[in-house]
Amino acid sequence: MPGLTRSQAKRLIELGRVVVDGAAPKAGLLLRGGERLRVEPEPPEAWSVAPEPIPVPVLFQDDDLVVVDKPADLVVHPAVGHPRGTLVNALAHLGAAGGDPGRPGIVHRLDRGTSGVMVVARNVAAHARLAEQFARHTVEKCYAAIVVGEPPDAGRIDTFYGRHPVDRQRFTSKVPRGRRALTFYRTVERAAGCARLDVRLGTGRTHQIRVHLAESGWPILGDPVYGRRPRDPVLRGAAERLGRPALHAAALAFDHPRTGERMRFEAPLPSDFREAWASVRGG
């Protein structure tokens, strides 16, 4: 099943949500070919958070989904260290979860420092159909980025992808095997020592754009994990004022989970991104 990690698969087996030829298997069962498998994904996680009046622009909303323009520095889902002040809290306040407030409908995530378009399901059926599109890589995901360095006019980066062998909180394409990661990019504009890119994802791995660009020699401006502190004082000042990676989810396109209609949403570049680019290009 595309998009399902080994740990997620193991959990589904342990919960009895995987059936092989009509029987619940053990995790170590060796498949020989020809077996009939039935896999029942877990429903979206239950909310255990209070609504909070956090301003989040809503680009579209109906009975099945809500599309938002996530601000930078907003965590998507409550986690250790971030129990409050998340996108989920904001959606609860907006009533954007639909009829069942116990299901957040988070289908995909953006890093805390990344701004831009996100879609959230408002019911279990919509969640399943959207999640399938993300797993099959039929969702169009376009980003804007400012990078340090001089990338070519356009290109594609196609690599294996996995966790860093030493720092398990990071990811890398420098692995001999792993899942495939595919990134397309186009240089939109250049300035001294940097460039603004349009980036399109062929796959959706964690930190994929940040890793692929950094390991190609063009780290994202302001990226504290995969980037580096620019030597140029203008670039360094822009990164410090920005205070986050210069990465913005500019557009998202998918099929509506109920009607099948192709939908596309765009989020304008936020002011901090525009100001960072204006400062490095001298205008």
Image: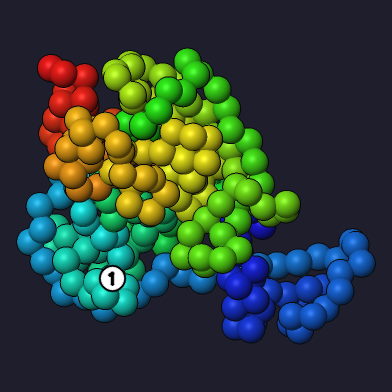
Residue drawn 40% across the image and 28% down it = 149
Q: Is residue 2 visible?
A: yes
Tell me which colouring the rendered structure shows. Answer: rainbow
Residue tagged 1: 78
Residue drawn 32% across the image and 73% down it = 79
Q: Residue 81: x percent and y percent?
A: 26, 75
Q: Residue 75: x percent and y percent?
A: 26, 60
Residue drawn 17% across the image and 37% down it = 237
Q: Which residue is at the front of the view, 41 or 54?
A: 54
- Tell me the quarter of the image containing the C terminus: top left
Q: Residue 168: x percent and y percent?
A: 52, 67
Residue 213 shown left or right of residue 263 in the figure = right
The vertical placement of 242 against 77, above or below, is above
Q: Quadrant of residue 57?
A: top left
Circle 1 — which element? loop
- Tell me the quarter of the image containing the N terminus: bottom right
Residue lying at the far left in this picture: please name it. Answer: 53
Residue 204 shown left or right of residue 193 in the figure = right
The vertical placement of 158 against 119, above or below, is above
Q: Quadrant of residue 221?
A: top left
Label 1 neighbourhood size at 10 Å, few (<14), some (14-19), many (20+)? some
Q: How many marks?
A: 1
Q: Is residue 274 visible?
A: no
Q: Residue 165: x percent and y percent?
A: 60, 63
Q: Which residue is at the front of the view, 160 or 217?
A: 217
Residue drawn 29% across the image and 55% down it = 112
Q: Quadrant of residue 41?
A: bottom right
Q: Amino acid at mark 1?
A: Pro
Residue 30 shown left or right of residue 97 in the figure = right
